[in-house]
Every structure is written in structure tokens, then in C-alpha cells.
Image: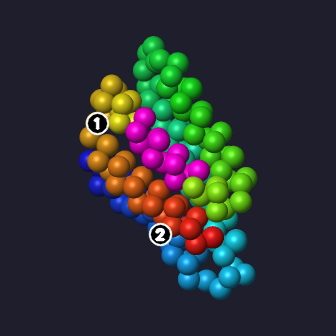
Amino acid sequence: MSPVALRMGHLGLLPFVVGAALVWLVHAPLRPPVAQGLAVYAALVVALLGGVHWGIGFAEPSPPVSLFTWGSVPGLLAWLAAMMPPESGLVLAGVLLVAGYLVDRRVYPRHGLSAWLTLRFRLSAVAALCCFLGAAGA
């Protein structure tokens, strides 16, 4: 496991944790923009995780079409989540984080990436939990 990837992955959780906490801590008039900020960040991360599949496909001489198909789906659904009111968009983003991990559990081992699944699980679990907590507080 790359120490840089580990540190950067944990650093990437800061907006999730801070955003979810702020949704609950700020005065009511500030909740919608804080929740929207969390929802947009979550959508960006979901799209990035889909993009990993494009990267896997680019690294292979004859990649399956499914890599590029799934690589596109999270970004499209994340865009929809970012356009929704935060209380529902955050739920969709949380579900996408969980669904993306479940897909990756099947895809990563086929491409020699099993070592990343533990980190992927931890980051996705915290991020999804923050999305659900943010949605509940929005």
C-alpha cells in the first residue's frame, strides 16, 4: 500500500467529515449551502471513482467494454445527485459510494488491484456515512 495514497485518501475524507459535522452544527440558514457543498464534493468523488475504471481500461491491451461503461455511469448519476436538493442528493451519493465499492470488489481482483480494496472500503464507508448523516441533518 502506497503511504502517499493512504495519506491522500484520508485527506480526501476531510470535506466529508467536516461537511457532515457542519450540517449539524451551523445555524439553520447556513445548512442548505453547507449541505450543497457536501453533496457537490460527494458527486465529484463518485465521478472520480468511476474514472478509475477508465484508467484500468487504458492500461489493458484489450479491455472489456464494461470498464468504460461502468466508468461513465457513476459520473452521470453523480451529476444527477449534485443537481438534486441536498437532502436527497446526498442519499443518492451515499448509495453510489456503496454500490461503487461493491462493483470494485468484483472488478479490482480481475485486474490485480485487490490490495486496494481495504483502503477503498474504509474510505467509502466513512464517505457514505457522512453523506447519510449530512442528508439527515439537511
Q: Is residue 101 above or below residue 12?
A: above
How packed mark 2 is, by other alpha carbons closer than 10 Å (few <14, some 14-19, many 20 or more), is: some
Residue under pointer 1: 114
Residue bearing the label numbered 2: 17
Q: Which three-letter amino acid code belongs to the residue tagged 2?
A: Val
In the rendered image, residue 55, in percent from the top left (x then y), is placed at: 48, 32
Specify the farthest residue to the top: 62
Q: Residue at x 51, y 67 (%)?
A: 133
Left or right, 13 with reference to 6: right
Question: For the residue labelled by badge 1, is the local secondary structure a helix, a strand or a loop?
Answer: helix
Residue at position x 56%, y 68% in the image = 136
Q: Earlier in the sequence, mark 2 or mark 1?
A: 2
Task: Name which residue type carries label 1.
Answer: Ser
The segment highlighted magenta reads 92-103
Position of residue 102 measured from the top left corner of the image (x, y, whole percent): 40, 39
- Residue furthest front in the image: 136
Tally the marks.
2
What is the quadrant of the C terminus in the image? bottom right
The residue depicted at 29 percent of the width and 55 percent of the height is 3
- Residue 42 showing in the rendered view: yes
